[in-house]
Amino acid sequence: MNPPAEPPAETGTARHEPARGAPIFVDLTPAAFRAHLPQLLSVYVAAMKYPRGTESHRAPMWSEHAGRTGWQAVTVALPEDPGTFVGIAYGYRGDPHQWWNQQVRTGMRHTGKSREYIDSVLGDYFELTELHVRPDTQGLGLGRSLLYRLLRDRTERTVLLSTPEVPGEDNRAWRLYRRFGFVDVVRRFVFTGDARPFAVLGRTLPLEPHLAPPASTGPS
């Protein structure tokens, strides 16, 4: 595995795009991620339209995730306000002992998938845990750039994610995932503790070169 180089300061390493006015992408260390949790969770709550107070419930989980094997996080800010993150993407290497892995395994088994197939899907994967862009900055290609930067150097065989089901797959997240070649693994699955149906999607790695975003918005 080839993780990003460790930044020299606790705030991570900001890599400015050469084009004027281009977004600023930042690879965070675990310590920097935890330090910025309130700001990052505010992006998450706004993007997911969750009620206020959700941040306090999610913070311990996000903090624990930052200690998992293969963890990686990318954020983005706009040049007019470089101190404010407007997008976050992170994930880590999947493991059979993780709750999400066990839930997905159960869902696949209930849909009649063979043990061999389930083991092949869940044997070597990167879990794309969160990908969010603040609603007022959506439509600028930031989600595409975050996704590409997060996945471009991963060495796992596949990447998996879960996203809420929506009628006709008609939202930005679904269109982005389909554009990146994600296919169905489990549909209309209800995770323990959440009444909403989710889809589990996946695709093989590495990413194809044509998925790289334009230079004006893409990662350096």
Image (cartoon, rainbow, N blue to C red):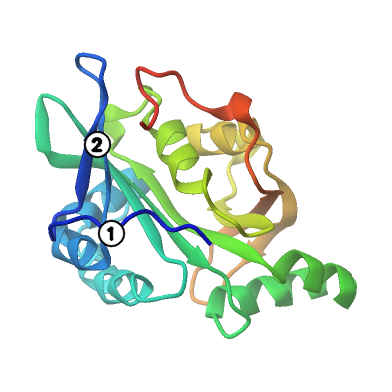
Does label 2 or label 1 sit earlier along the sequence?
1
- Residue 113 at x, y = what percent? 87, 68
Q: SS at mark 1?
A: loop
* Relative vertical location of residue 57 with respect to residue 129 in this rendering, above or below: below
Tell me the quadrant of the picture where the C terminus can be found.
top left
Q: Is residue 6 above or below residue 206?
A: below
Q: Where in the figure is residue 8, as x and y percent of width and height?
A: 16, 56
- Residue 83 % position (x, y): 9, 40
Is mark 2 in CB contact (under 8 Å) with mark 1?
Answer: no
Which residue: 24% across, 36% down? 15
Q: Mark 2 is on which residue type?
A: Arg
Q: Which secondary structure, mark 2?
A: strand
Q: Residue at x 49, y 76 (%)?
A: 193
- Disc number placed over residue 15 in the picture, else none: 2
Q: Is residue 54 left or right of residue 96?
A: left
Q: CA distance from mark 2 to mark 1?
A: 13 Å
The disc label shown at residue 6, or none: 1
Q: Amino acid at mark 1?
A: Glu
Q: Residues within 10 Å of mark 1 (few under 14, many from 20)?
A: few
